[in-house]
Image (tube, grey):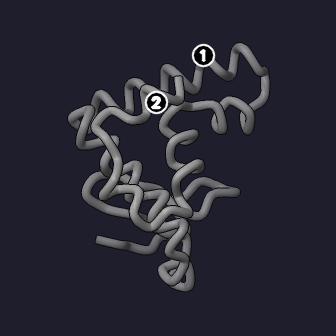
Amino acid sequence: MILFSRYLIPKNYTGLAIYPFIFLKNKSLSDNWVLINHERIHLKQQLELLWIFFFIWYTLEFLFHLVVFRNWHKAYKNISFEKEAYQNEGNPNYLNERKPWSFLEYL
């Protein structure tokens, strides 16, 4: 289910996945299938890690990379979940072809 909220989405971001919802900054983004696919990949990751463990892992990995890179954007881009989503967001068949726990390949 896609919902719209410019207040829930952090500055400089356009979408956010929190199972079972995809939040977009505005309605015009709902036509962006690459963005929707990116967020759907995150929904699949969240299911695999029973939701709460996804967010714990995501936060810990982000903090680790923040210490290493000392740069918010680099830390974010190096999270394994984000690497998987960015690398495969342009493939409309990715979720059908994806193997479970695929994000581990991006650690």
Residue 24's disc number: none
* Position in image of residue 51 (x %, y %): 26, 38
**Residue toward you, 93 or 76:** 93
Dots 2, 1 in contact, CB < 8 A: no
Q: Is residue 19 above or below residue 105?
A: below
Q: Nearer the viewer, residue 70 or 42?
A: 42
**Residue 64 - label:** 1
Rendering coords of residue 64 (x, y %):
60, 16
The residue tagged 2 is 58
**Left or right position of 32 against 18:** right
Q: What residue lies at 66% left-to-right and 38% top-to-bottom?
A: 77
Q: Residue at x 21, y 35 (%)?
A: 50
Up the image or down, 104 lies above or below 37; here it is above
Point out the image quarter for the N terminus: bottom left
What kind of residue is marked 1? Phe
Q: Is residue 45 above or below residue 25?
A: above
Furthest-front residue in this view:
97
Q: Quadrant of residue 69?
A: top right
Q: Circle 1 sits in a helix, a strand or a loop, which is it?
A: helix
Q: Is 12 left, or right, of 98 in this rendering?
A: right
Q: Residue 81, how many percent across, how many down?
A: 48, 37
